[in-house]
Image (cartoon, rainbow, N blue to C red):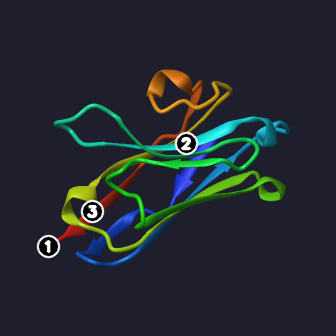
Amino acid sequence: QLVESGGGLVQDGGSLGLSCAASGRTFSNYHMGWFRQTPQNEREFVARISSRGIITYADSVKGRFTISRDNAKNTVYLQMNSLKPEDTAVYYCAAGLTIGARTPAGYQYWGQGTQVTVSS
């Protein structure tokens, strides 16, 4: 089970931090990803961190977002800085075993999502 927290409303240029707490004893084996979705668009890749700590970002968030994980706490984080109105979406965390996955199909477990709204 994955539970996201930390979403909310922030002004253009502001920052927010998201957390995703996972239950289970094998968290460290999973690759973790963050995705986002708006009503008009399909779920899109934001960032991922492998079980070994290899990190990949979507070009749209590179240099502004930071993904990290704490295996002792079974938690993955997404720090979002310099937020823009186009970052407004429901953000989902996901866990999977597929190496290098940047699409939803590569993840087996999903959180319920948390809303991030960036006002202009």
Q: Which residue is mark 3?
A: 117
Q: Which residue is mark 1?
A: 120
Q: Where does residue 18 sit, x and y in percent of width and height?
A: 51, 61
* Label 1–label 3 contact, CB within 8 A: no
Q: Which residue is mark 2?
A: 33
Q: Where does residue 8 sit, x and y in percent of width and height?
A: 36, 66
Q: Where does residue 22 sit, x and y in percent of width and height?
A: 69, 45
**The residue under label 2 is which amino acid type?**
Gly
The local secondary structure at tag 1 comes to: loop
The local secondary structure at tag 2 comes to: strand
Q: Quadrant of the C terminus?
A: bottom left
Residue 104, numbered circle: none
Q: Quadrant of the N terminus?
A: top right
Question: Residue at horizontal 21%, vertical 35%?
Answer: 41
Instruction: State the image quarter where residue 99 is shown.
Output: top right
Asked if residue 10 lies left or right of residue 76, the reply is: left
- Separation of disc 1 and disc 2 at Cα? 27 Å
- Separation of disc 3 and disc 2 at Cα? 20 Å
**The residue under label 1 is which amino acid type?**
Ser
Question: Residue at horizontal 76%, vertical 45%?
Answer: 52
The local secondary structure at tag 3 comes to: strand
**The residue under label 3 is which amino acid type?**
Thr
* Label 2: few (<14), some (14–19) or many (≥20) C-alpha neighbours in 10 Å: many
Pair 3/2: label in front = 2
Q: Where does residue 101 sit, x and y in percent of width and height?
A: 54, 30
